[in-house]
Image: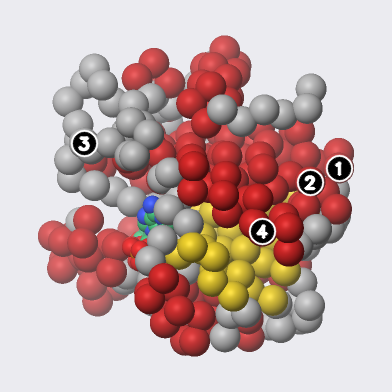
Amino acid sequence: MHALDRALDLTVVPGYTRLGYSVRSRWWDELPRMDGRVVLVSGATSGIGLAAATALAGLGARVQIIARNEQRGERAREQSGAERVWECDVSSMRSVRELARRFREEHSELDVLVNNAGVLPAERSLSEEGHELALATNVLGPFLLTGLLVPALEAAAPSSIVNVSSGGMYTARLGVNDLQTERRSYDGGAVYARHKRAQVVLSELWAERLNPHGVAVHSMHPGWVDTPGLERSLPRFHRLMKPALRSPEEGADTIVWLAATKRPGGGFWHDRERRPTHLLRRTRESDEERARLWSECLRLTGLELPS
Ligand SMILES: NC(=O)c1ccc[n+]([C@@H]2O[C@H](COP(=O)([O-])OP(=O)(O)OC[C@H]3O[C@@H](n4cnc5c(N)ncnc54)[C@H](OP(=O)(O)O)[C@@H]3O)[C@@H](O)[C@H]2O)c1
């Protein structure tokens, strides 16, 4: 199995499609139950997040959905079997702070945080606080939410965080010199790939900090998945690849597996296997760039962490 899995990964196209899923999943075990464990999932109104919320609720978890729109959130709650909807726009630091405050009032413990909400806009725009909108949604909001929920995650240890990245990050270097894409022209796909790279690096940095306290921090990529988001953001790619795309359930599988199996530590995962974080030498970042990403995220979100 291992050689076949590696071959699928290196050839990218078959590995990322439903073919990769159907070959690999033959060897997989059934997932353990998650009865009573509290799981918070962002972007659960659609696509991969909705499928993850449904599967997690099916395992008995007390799923909490983050949704920026009340109606869509309520519809997703009914569809998925989730326990509760929390209204929050993850691109707004004000809204993320409010969510974290309210959540911690009701829950002293959080077993799993899934940062899944993501966007790939074609054009540059700004969030309510003046951050580049995709950066705020893909990187800053999840970073702040993670930081504010650390006490609840530590209280539930062994607990975990799963950050949903993308295979697109393999093409990108960390764009830490121009995080808000102010200096170069805005290419939505390239900006998104840089954000997905940043998510993987931040996951590793959070893991260094949180692993000693029993909190695992993973990142993963779902492959190419037939979702409303993909259809909207990359319509040509979606049309061309449609017959080979994974279902949202297949794309969500590794999120659910990481959450259910309480895998400790961290790593970048796809189809229940750890994957390399770089395929090209040119995408490697320095330690200084990693440290600068961390301090920029602290500065832009205003997050204060105990030293
Ligand atoms: N589909 C793929 O092939 C693929 C491949 C690699 C990685 N991914 C990643 O998988 C994740 C899910 O994507 P998807 O394909 O399932 O896309 P999707 O169908 O568009 O779902 C995205 C979710 O994020 C939510 N969201 C977006 N901006 C938000 C905000 N500011 N505040 C709160 N929620 C927000 C959306 O809520 P609304 O309903 O309110 O819009 C929706 O629930 C993303 O991180 C994406 O980068 C997807």
Q: CA distance from mark 4 to mark 1?
A: 21 Å
Type of amino acid at the residue the image marks with label 1? His
Among the two numbered marks 3 and 4 on one chain, the one whose residue lies closer to the N terminus = 4
- In the rendered image, residue 27, in percent from the top left (x then y), is placed at 63, 76
Type of amino acid at the residue the image marks with label 4? Phe
Residue 103's disc number:
4
- In the rendered image, residue 188, in percent from the top left (x then y), is placed at 23, 41
Quadrant position of residue 43? bottom left
Secondary structure, mark 3, is loop
Among the two numbered marks 1 and 2 on one chain, the one whose residue lies closer to the N terminus = 2
Residue at 72%, 29% (x, y): give it. Answer: 305
Mark toward the viewer: 2 or 4: 4
| CB-based contact (under 8 Å), mark 2 and mark 4 | no
Type of amino acid at the residue the image marks with label 2? Pro
Type of amino acid at the residue the image marks with label 3? Arg
Mark toward the viewer: 1 or 3: 3
Per the image, the residue denoted by label 2 is 151
Q: Nearer the viewer, residue 38 or 271?
A: 38
Among the two numbered marks 2 and 3 on one chain, the one whose residue lies closer to the N terminus = 3
